[in-house]
Image: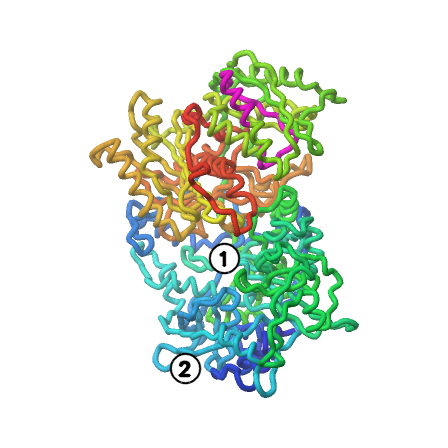
Amino acid sequence: MSDRGGYGRGRGRGDGGTGFQHGGRGGSPAGRGGDRGGYSGRGGDRGGFRGGRGDAGGGRGRGGVQQMTMRSGPPGGGQGGIFLEGQPVPKPDGAITATEDELVKTTRDRTFTLGTEGALVPGRRGYGTQGKAITLRTNYFVIKTAAELNLPQHEKVWYRYDCEVTPAPSKAKCRRLFDKIFTHPKFDGITWASDWAKIIVTTEPLDLEGTEWKQKVVIPPEPVPGVEPDAYQGEVPQFVQDAQNRNRVEFRITLTGSFNVRDVINLLQSKSPGAEYASASEVLQLANIITCKPPNTGNYIRNAGSNRFYPHKGHPGVESYDLGNALEALRGYYASVRPAVGRLLLNLNVTSGAFYKPLPLKDLLTEYGHHKTDMAENFIRMLKVEAAYTKDGQAQPFMKKIKTIVGYSQKPRFGDAKAVKFQYKASTSPDAQPVLTSVFDYFKTHHGITLKFPGDAVLNVGTKADPQYLPLELCTVVAGQPFKRLLQGDQTSEMLKFAARTPNLNAMSIAGTQRSPGNGLRLFRLLNPNDPNGEMVQRSSVKPWGFQVGVDMMTVPGRILNNPQIKYGSKSVTPRGGSWNCADVKFARPGLMGKWTVLVVNHNGQKGRALNPQPRDGLAPEPLFSELEGFLKKYGLQMTQRQKTQNITLDTLSLQNRATNNRQLEHIFSSAESNGINFLFVVIPEYDAWLYARIKYFGDVKYGIHTINSVGSKLQKVNGQGMYMGNLALKFNIKSGGVNHHIEGTLGKPLDNKTMLMGIDVTHPSPGSKEGAPSISCVVASIDDYLTQWPGDIRTQTGRQEMVDGLEDMVIKRLELWQKYHKNELPAKIILYRDGVSEGQYDQVLLRELPSFHAAFKRKYGAENKWPKMTVIVVGKRHHTRFFPTSRDHADYNPQREKGSWNPLPGTIVDRHIGNRILGEFWLQAHQGLQGTARPAHYVILKDDIKFEADELQRFTHNMCYLFNRATKAVSICPPAYYADLLCERGRSYLHSTLNENHGTDSSVFDASEEWTGGVHPKLAESTWYI
């Protein structure tokens, strides 16, 4: 069926034969068009808009996009196996390999400009060759342009128009405005796409007077499904005219350029490193807008930003899962057009998000578990609801409206329908005097609605200054609204159950098979059942724009790197499947713990006892602590006699008891400091974020005591107790300055023992954090040749700023500490792994952060010729590239035990066919992806004075993933980036209430003068205290 436009009254047209191979009869059925211009009659907008007939090919806005039938899928978990097992595996494109080999000869030892500010980056020096060669599928699809297919008659020029709206409307209003604009006769017969914010792209020039078009437009009201807008005969009511005047804006579009995608292809296929096309980034931006138009204009699909689209209630392909506490998970899809050597590619991936359940608001709040509270108000603030007005005795509402909740009533606070009153002036008489009325009486007399639940708190759906009241019993939550704050612990666990799916299931969701195409390809209208190559459906999606998208996942060449040997005190261990057992070994260098004791924390709530004094199985508390002590000594740790166990009982861990509990905790830490305690082993009943945060704050920041936390039930559990205590021993040893394990030759050619490694990360406030909440920046650096000890610097900075403030001083501190542990010598080489930087910020690392290093070098080394050689590598985790094994021999699967994750094997690396034509980059899955579809780490080289060969850097980075000091397995990202990330998370715990709890906006403001802003206690500053 076709989608209906918001206020459509016009009829649509088919696409008129836009397929590459032959003309069609029209890819989409007739659709209903757009807004006729607000209200009919006087007072309406007469700006030339009428019912739209849609565009001539690429869909017709909300009025003409064909809704594809999609299959629903399981919530998560599920079927393993190899995707498309038994079917032929296409060989990776040899022509692309040949082009890469030719191009890399010319990029080696050259620098290139990145971005618009002149940042210089090194060209790729080569491709890796070490390891076992394999073939993988990846979630990329090849884009072919009409030029590449030698079909010049189907090539298209893309015209870009920049849009400006004055005054600037909200995002939702802007969307409705653009929908209305597309019904203007200027768009008749025009293939168009838009981001519904600032850009319109067409395949033909619009009929403008010159290069600009201005128009006064009334933004239509929020459409209600199944409800036509009010039409007034004769005089338009004053309140309607007032609403129109408030929503009248000036819309201006300006032609800013025309582009041919052929020029981008010429650039990507060029074997000259100096080839340029100044508008390449603009063309890619337009290609993404075009590709995302089908889901952007479909019914019952939420655009959650960043090219992520979620089918929700009402869509045939909705996949949802109950997260509890009024939230649900939805499965969606992400798409991005990306440049690679020789071609354009479409990256398509599965994504998951948390959303409000589309329930009656009263039911939603009941499930949430709070009603007349600040927490409930914060939970529903800015939530859109559909208010249905149904008169007494009638079955159907006579009116529906979409409203946005500002909060509960303020006067009186949380007032109900009888308590909340306001001045109401009847509109029937111009001389009528305002009358004080309650919300209850207003709805009864004005709307004929007797409220069934007058005791419920009244909603404010106006503004704080001009409240408009609405009973919540009339409201239903509009579907598809993302929950943008932190999930609770149980909800996070449920989300993982939904999102963590085997590679085979995710590949089926993305691409599927010819008989059963994946929901991802269907959502973007690239493939349908009974249309095996997407020939028909793409006639109305991407082919009108001069390109088509392959519907088979690409294959790429990959390799599996060899595991390194792990060295302990007198033994070597060979990892298997990315992990190893350290039972029967001594640490490579045992640490010296100093004075330590156990702190048992109980509380008066349910399950508030940390340890069972008389367990049916296992040991009572004191023998248990002696058992732990024995484990620590077995691994070689040196320690003094354990001090007497301390016990504390807190009040229930509620918000109301925090002040009292905080005082009790601080008292115990103060006493420990007075008694010279260096280590506190803290046993707690269960994980509680606030309790954990306070323990770490008092230990790390205020009193300088190392703390290691353990949940009592896990400590007392007999099954697996040895492994659990072994993991605790790893932390004890690292915090004591020891070395757990190492890899011989880690700092081999081209490195040496004068090499310092560094990691940088920045973490930002979450939605719901206090107003003015800061970001937290962290720098960690190695101080030993084993790359085991990583002290760090941590501080707050301006919220949501990614580039690090005060970096020069932080680098100075790291250099001076390295110098202290290396006979007063400074490092000759520095390798920086920078975490958390998006592609669009690569140049900013070089332009904003690298100068801070140079300033630090000038202060510590003097002349530039004495500075250390430096390599800068960005580590990416939040990308959408995934790899899928094509053979059981190359998958994480044990046929004897019939168990495995079916992910690629640990050590799988890819550096060909999907990467940048100039930059050196690779994707490395060093770890064993135990749950869900493994995400490889993405490494991009931005600076390389050391001049690593590809194999050298890839092997070094892979080996380092086995050096993470609190685990006996390879980790997903290399330790410098991982430690920086952990330190940022520790900083978040110091500001737990500010950053991690959902706050209302009235009184929750960050005050830097009263809260932690950086640093830790001097006694811990030279240790890896945050592990």
- Residue type pointed to by label 2: Asp
User: Mark 2 packing: few (<14 Cα in 10 Å), some, or many (20+)?
Assistant: few
Mark carried by residue 841: none
The residue to which callout 2 is attached is 207
Place of residue 322 in the rendered image (x, y in percent of width and height, measured from the top left):
69, 51
User: Does 986 appear above or below 739?
Assistant: below
Q: Nearer the viewer, residue 968 or 255?
A: 255
Query: From where the camera sits, is residue 538 visible?
Result: yes
**Three-letter amino acid code at the position of disc 1:** Ser
- N-terminal of the pair, mark 1 or mark 2, is 2
* Left or right of residue 456, residue 778 in this image: left
Measuring 22% from the left and 33% from the top, which residue is drawn there? 862
Residue 620 in the image: above or below residue 807? above
* Of 246 and 433, the residue lying toward us: 433
Task: Give yes or no for residue 686 being in the magenta stretch.
Answer: yes
Place of residue 367 in the rendered image (x, y in percent of width and height, measured from the top left): 70, 51
The magenta stretch spans residue 806: no
Q: Quadrant of residue 128?
A: top left
Specify few, some or many for label 1: CA neighbours under 10 Å numbering under 14, 14-19, or 20 or more.
few
User: Is there any visible trace of residue 13 in the rendered image?
Assistant: no
User: Where does label 1 land, which residue?
Assistant: 306
Q: Position of residue 12 (x, y in %)?
A: 57, 80
Side of 456 relative to 251 (left or right): right
The x, y position of residue 498, in whole percent, is 65, 48
Residue at 64% of width from left, 52% of height from top?
A: 329
Residue stretch in magenta: 666-691
